[in-house]
Image (cartoon, rainbow, N blue to C red):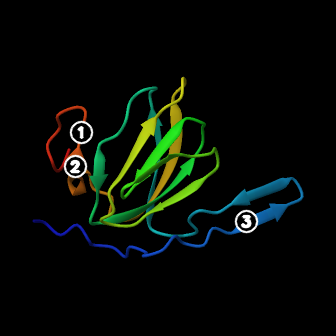
Amino acid sequence: MENYVTKSIPDTKPEVPFIERPWGSFKQFAFNEDCTVSLMEVKPGMQLSLQSHTGRAELWIVLDQGAKVQVGENARICDQGEEIWIKANEKHRLSCVGEKPCRVLEVAFGNWQQQDITRYEDDFSRPESGD
C-alpha cells in the first residue's frame, strides 16, 4: 500500500476565525495554509461513494439544504452553513436528499490525490481505490 501522507494533516478542525468589517463579516477557513478547495455538487437522489483517505482531512461547509452527510457510522441531514470535520482515515459520504442539487465546499488539509481514495461502497461500480 502506498503512503499518501506527504504533508501535515491536522487532527482537529482548525480554528475558523470570524472577522467583522463595516460592510458585514466573513469566516476564514484557511489562512496562508497548504490546502485544496473544491466545490462539490450532488444531484438529487445521488451520493458519493462511502470512502476514506489516508493523506488528507477535510472540512465540509454545507451551502444548500438537502445535504445528507455520513461520518463514521453516523448519517444526518445537515443545515445550510453547517461545518463538518472529517479526520484522515475516517469513512464519509455526501448524499443529496433534496429536490434540487446540493453543494458542499470542501477544504482539504494534507495531500489531495485521487489515488488516495478507499471506497467501501459505490453506486457506480468503481474500483475500491483510486480514480
Q: What element carries label 3?
A: strand
Q: How far apart are marks 3 and 1 (CA)?
A: 37 Å
x 35%, y 64%: residue: 56
In this picture, is 10 found above or below 124? below
Residue 119 disc label: 2
Looking at the image, the residue that sits furthest to the right is: 22
Q: Mark 3 points at which residue?
A: 18
Q: What element carries label 1?
A: loop
Q: How crowded is mark 3: few (under 14 residues within 10 Å), some or many (20 or more)?
A: few
Q: Where is residue 43 in the image (x, y as percent from the top left)?
A: 44, 27
User: Could you say which is closer to the camera, residue 97 or residue 12?
Assistant: 97
Q: Where is residue 19 in the image (x, y as percent from the top left)?
A: 76, 65
- Looking at the image, residue 119 sits to the left or right of residue 65; the answer is left
x 15%, y 47%: residue: 128
Q: Position of residue 16 (x, y in %)?
A: 63, 67
Q: Name the residue under label 1.
A: 122
x 64%, y 49%: residue: 81
Q: Distance between the residues labelled 2 and 3?
A: 35 Å
Under mark 3, the amino acid is Phe
Q: Residues within 10 Å of mark 2 (few under 14, many from 20)?
A: some
Under mark 2, the amino acid is Arg
Mark 2–mark 1 contact, CB under 8 Å? Answer: yes
Depth check, mark 2 against mark 3: the one in front is: 2
Task: Tell me which numbered mark, 3 or 1, is placed earlier along the sequence.
Answer: 3
Q: Position of residue 124 (x, y in %)?
A: 22, 31
Question: Which quadrant is home to the C terminus?
Answer: top left
Q: Distance between the residues labelled 2 and 1?
A: 7 Å
User: Could you say which is closer to the camera, residue 45 or residue 2?
Assistant: 45
Classify residue 27 by image quadrant.
bottom right
Under mark 1, the amino acid is Asp
- Looking at the image, residue 124 sits to the left or right of residue 87; the answer is left
